[in-house]
Image (spheres, rainbow, N blue to C red):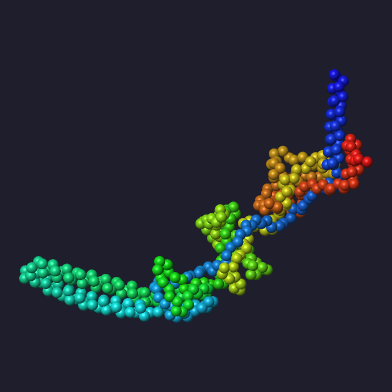
């Protein structure tokens, strides 16, 4: 029994040794030049983070001009793209019905005024006789009632004629601002009905040289967007042009569409050449982080941890970190000849690929970012086959 156990242990030991040798032959380099250190030089550069979104180009001030009275459009004085000034006549409605209503109201007002003046004189005479006890209480009360009724009717007619005159004024439509006519929704002879909603006749933009972009930013990115951040955007109409602006406003109202929550961000867009037209789709890039001309190194240099055995086989020595230094997340390794020196660094902003270095590494020093292993040729791998592994069939 003891002899069989010894034989089993010997067999298992040989199998494990063969596996270990095979693994070592697989992962070890074929020569000293197959493993190299990846390095980078600490240099000045720009670190940027950005958020992308899509939006629509719109005028800053856009006014919809309508009418509060129903009727027929009699005359139109402006058309698309016409420039207008504040107070300029742009349309007129048929005034025949409104003028007839005004004449009728004026006649009713004159009649009620005559009635009021007559009842007032009658009341004053009755009052004098009543004070001398020459008329009864019933006659006095009747005179007072007729007087107050006439007075109220006269006041009602006065208020009614004010509204009719204002409606007649609404039939003359003028531009409320200086600007450009963007759209015209009616034609001469068309009937418009002002019911629960005021019909829109014209849309006027104040200044097309000062535009804005309303961008829809995803809820995952809106936390990085702040007022004053720089923005670049392009439009499909001019694919080679890049327009610039700044974040003017981050609106708090959320919009949900197909379970996607977005927030509107208002971006300024100076348009001196009038290339940007209302309604264009803008592809927006908002720079949420900008650090220009700062000393930076690749972020992976802060994650590199050298292996002493591997470094020694490559001819490099490793300096021992000083006591009390921070963890590896704040350490990078600087090459000093054939020695790797650990440096505790103070980091600033990072864009994921590059990290700002405030202190710890000087500009121009070389830092190690990783180890690169060259691929072993197929023929070399076949030649280095373990003697314990079975060969291919003959």
Task: Name the side, left or right, on which 58 lies relative to 354.
Answer: left
Q: Residue furthest front?
A: 394
Determine whether, in the image, residue 180 is placed left or right of residue 35.
left
Q: Is residue 33 left or right of residue 356?
A: right
Q: Quadrant of residue 165?
A: bottom left
**x and y, in percent, of residue 97 in the image:** 35, 78
Residue drawn at x 33%, y 79% as measured from the top left: 100
Quadrant (top left/top right/bottom left/bottom right) for the N terminus: top right
Residue 299 appears anywhere in the view: yes
Residue 241 percent location from the top left of the image: 66, 68
Residue drawn 69% across and 41% down? 327
Q: Is residue 148 above or below residue 355?
A: below
Q: Residue at x 86, y 28 (%)?
A: 11
Q: For residue 46, which quarter of the picture?
A: bottom right
Q: Position of residue 113 (x, y in %)?
A: 23, 76
**Depth check, front residue: 242 or 172:** 172
- On screen, residue 227 above or below 12: below
């Amino acid at each position: 029994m003891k002899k069989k156990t010894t034989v089993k242990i010997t067999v298992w030991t040989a199998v494990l040794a063969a596996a270990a040798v095979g693994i070592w032959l697989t992962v070890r380099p074929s020569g000293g030049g197959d493993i190299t250190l990846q390095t980078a030089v600490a240099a000045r550069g720009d670190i940027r983070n950005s958020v992308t979104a899509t939006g629509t180009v719109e005028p800053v001030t856009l006014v919809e001009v309508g009418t509060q009275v129903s009727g027929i459009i009699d005359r139109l004085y402006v058309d698309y793209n016409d420039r207008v000034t504040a107070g300029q006549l742009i349309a007129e409605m048929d005034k025949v019905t409104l003028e007839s209503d005004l004449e009728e109201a004026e006649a009713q007002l004159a009649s009620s005024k005559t009635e009021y003046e007559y009842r007032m004189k009658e009341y004053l005479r009755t009052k004098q006789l009543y004070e001398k006890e020459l008329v009864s209480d019933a006659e006095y009360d009747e005179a007072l009632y007729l007087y107050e009724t006439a007075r109220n009717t006269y006041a009602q007619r006065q208020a009614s004629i004010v509204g009719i005159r204002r409606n007649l004024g609404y039939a003359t439509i003028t531009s409320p601002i200086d600007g450009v006519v963007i759209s015209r929704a009616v034609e001469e002879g068309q009937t418009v009905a002002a019911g629960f909603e005021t019909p829109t006749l014209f849309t006027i933009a104040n200044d097309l040289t000062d535009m804005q972009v309303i961008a829809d930013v995803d809820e995952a990115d809106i936390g990085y967007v702040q007022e004053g951040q720089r923005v670049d955007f392009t439009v499909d109409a001019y694919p080679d042009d890049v327009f610039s602006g700044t974040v003017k406003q981050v609106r708090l109202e959320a919009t949900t569409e197909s379970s996607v929550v977005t927030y509107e961000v208002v971006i300024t867009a100076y348009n001196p050449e009038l290339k940007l037209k209302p309604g264009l789709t803008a592809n927006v890039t908002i720079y949420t982080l900008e650090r220009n001309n700062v000393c930076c190194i690749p972020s992976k240099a802060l994650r590199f941890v050298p292996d002493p055995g591997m470094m020694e086989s490559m001819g490099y020595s490793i300096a021992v970190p000083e006591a009390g230094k921070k963890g590896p997340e704040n350490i990078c390794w600087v090459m000093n000849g054939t020695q790797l020196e650990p440096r505790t660094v103070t980091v600033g902003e990072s864009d994921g690929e590059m990290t700002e270095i405030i202190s710890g590494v000087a500009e121009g020093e070389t830092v190690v970012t990783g180890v690169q292993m060259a691929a072993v040729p197929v023929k070399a791998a076949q030649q280095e086959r373990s003697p314990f592994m079975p060969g291919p069939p003959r």
